[in-house]
Amino acid sequence: MFAQEVAAADPGFPQGILPLRALYLIPFGAKGGHKRGVLIKSADGSGFSSLELLWQASKLQTAMIASHDNGVGIYRSGFQNRIPSFYLWGSRDMAGIVPELQRKQE
């Protein structure tokens, strides 16, 4: 259902695969601090599609802050228990690097 909605809204949405069987997503709380990372396993055990990863991140972040309306961004954090981890934030990263890169490309 979600995949069809995204495909209908944006036929050009990237369809890549992140070849990881599992990863940690680190959501943020109401005061902006990070919560404990949550282990997410790919549905088919071979990797995450763009849509699957976005859906999992959106579900996790919405569970933390239902009124969050700044989109969801997924940013590389490092490793947790030797498994890649990514922090969640809004559509702009906390370090402000993404907007800076966007300005340089314009």
Image (cartoon, helix red, strand yellow):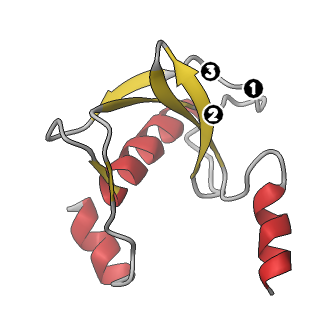
SS at badge 2: strand
Residue extending furthest top? 81
Q: Amino acid at mark 1?
A: Gly
Residue in the image at 53% along x and 38% along y: 61
Ranked by sequence position, the earlier of labels 2 and 1 is: 1
Q: Does 49 sit above or below residue 14?
A: above
Q: Nearer the viewer, mark 3 or mark 2?
A: 2
Query: Which quarter of the picture shows residue 49?
Result: bottom left
Q: Residue at x 78, y 82 (%)?
A: 105
Report which residue position mark 1 lands on. 33
Q: Percent x, y for residue 65? A: 59, 36
Q: Earlier in the sequence, mark 3 or mark 2?
A: 3
Q: How many marks?
A: 3
- Please name the residue shown 17% across and 35% down the image: 45
Quadrant of the rendering where the C terminus is positioned: bottom right
- One can see residue 25 in this view: no
Give the amino acid type for the residue marked by disc 2 in the picture: Ser
Q: Are circles 3 and 2 on residues that touch, CB within 8 Å?
A: no
- How many residues crowd mark 3 within 10 Å: few (<14), some (14–19), many (20+)? some
The kind of secondary structure element at disc 1 is: loop
The span from disc 3 to disc 2 (Cα, nearest Å) is 13 Å
Q: Which one is nearer the viewer's eye here, 23 or 5?
A: 23
Name the residue that disc number 2 marks.
Answer: 77
Q: Quadrant of residue 88?
A: top right
Q: Position of residue 47 (x, y in %)?
A: 26, 44
Q: Which residue is mark 3?
A: 35
Q: Decide: few, some or many residues near mark 2? Use Cα within 10 Å; few <14, some 14-19, many ≥20.
A: some
Do labels 3 and 1 touch, CB within 8 Å?
Answer: yes
Q: Is 32 left, or right, of 28 in this rendering?
A: right
Left or right of 62 on screen, residue 48: left
Residue 39 position in % (x across, y down): 39, 22
